[in-house]
Image (spheres, helix red, strand yellow):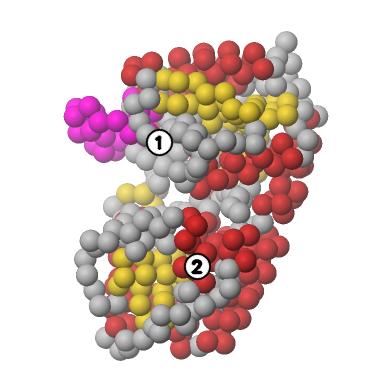
Amino acid sequence: MRIAFADMMFSWPPHGGGDVDMFHVMDGARRMGHEVRLFAVRDLDTWERGVLSQPTPFAVETLEFSGSGFNGPTLAQRFGQAVAAWEPDAVFAGQGFLMKPHLLRALARWPLVSRYHAHEAACLRDMLRFLDGKPCPCAFLETPDICRACSLERWGGEIRRGGANAWLREYLGAKAWGAAYPELVRDALRGVDIALVSTATMAASLEGLPKETRLFPSMVDISPFLAQPRDPAGCGRKVLFMPGRAEDPAKGHATLAAAAERLWAKRRDFLVKATLPQDATAAPWLEPLGWVSHREMPALYAGAAVCVAPSLWEEPFGLVAVEAMAAGCPVAASRRGGLADIMLDGETGLLFTPGDDAALADTLERLLDDAALRERLGAAGRKRARTEYGVETILERHYRPLWEDLARTRKGGGS
């Protein structure tokens, strides 16, 4: 089967987890014997999109855009023509934000899969759906006027200053502030045969408009984490490791900081290592790591007594939990979103109420005091990561049946 992949963000080496997931989906389809071609966007006005400085094992066709040419109708026309010229049997739409509905409408003539990695189908403000320190209850298909006002409040100043980033470029190019935008999104979703999401919350935001919605985990190569020997006693003090975008308020570092202060008042045998800017506010219990490369991550997990994931937002997929489990590191995580789906409370880690620093402090103290518990949770987590979240497992369990279902579906789009 010839599968065209359309992705508006993909870069390699990866800029984030979405790139990693898409790489494994495309490479996995290729290794299963399908003919794969990626149609990618290169926006010359931002650094985030379509930077492919390393070769990929699949063919790539890059469509370049710049200035006002990066808009919904133009993108739809160019993608539609490029994909049609290749004559695929099916199309898989990957990463994209507010212009993705234009892309979906252009590709609906073929059997169409649409993958969602965050809350881009529910929020005009950003892909987090996070406001005032907590998950936002609004979704723009349900509350369009509220969401339009919120998005303009967030982006109005940037627009007046001529700002440009990946989200804002799509916000402007899609005219997402307009009254017609919600119906355009609904129409695009109706043309999707199978939508792929990571959580039930994400599925609900699609309002049942795609013909089918499936829960698919994201993919990450866990082999480097499985291979790294554990060394949690390496620095003397027990390390509590917070990876990821720790400077983002949605990730909940403030909760961890308050919990650490509670613990520090009683004990001095721990150190919080967090991927915060190195000029972060000093604390005797904190070591800000700055930016950390992906190659350095396995050793950091291996040296940690506990991985802490205190997210406040509705995580679509708890990538750090999977990595930590693969490394045999017990996890203390918020009971929210993908983290709660991945973690087995009391078996592979411990869950706590999001934003409750007292509960987090109690959870961490329990883990710090009980080496046998840490060992048991870490071993169970490693087993779960290996059996549930390995790339080959996900490809065989989820993607092989998907490709088989698509092969049975024909819309005759290439004719």
Quadrant of image for the C terminus: top right
> Which residue is denoted by mark 1 in the rendering?
48
Q: Quadrant of residue 375?
A: bottom right
Of callouts 2 and 1, which one flags the residue occurring earlier in the amino acid sequence?
1
Question: Is 393 above or below relative to 20?
Answer: below
- Write down the region rendered in magenta: 150-172
Pointers 2 and 1 in contact (C-beta within 8 Å):
no
Is residue 157 in the magenta section? yes
Q: Residue at x 64, y 15 (%)?
A: 84
* Left or right: residue 52 compared with residue 391: left
Q: Residue at x 60, y 21 (%)?
A: 107
Q: Residue at x 29, y 77 (%)?
A: 285
> What type of secondary structure mainly makes up the magenta span?
helix
Is residue 136 in the magenta section? no
Q: Residue at x 37, y 20 (%)?
A: 66
**Rendered location of residue 158, percent (x, y):** 23, 33
Kind of residue at disc 1: Glu
- SS assignment at label 1: loop
Kind of residue at disc 2: Ala
**Rendered location of residue 170, percent (x, y):** 39, 28
- Please say whether residue 149 is visible from this viewpoint: no
**Rendered location of residue 214, percent (x, y):** 65, 43
> Which residue is denoted by mark 2 in the rendering?
299
- SS assignment at label 2: helix
Q: CA distance from mark 2 to mark 1?
A: 28 Å
Quadrant of image for the N terminus: top right
Question: Is 269 above or below relative to 94?
Answer: below
* Left or right: residue 17 compared with residue 84: left
**Rendered location of residue 382, percent (x, y):** 63, 69
Q: Residues within 10 Å of mark 2 (few under 14, many from 20)?
A: some
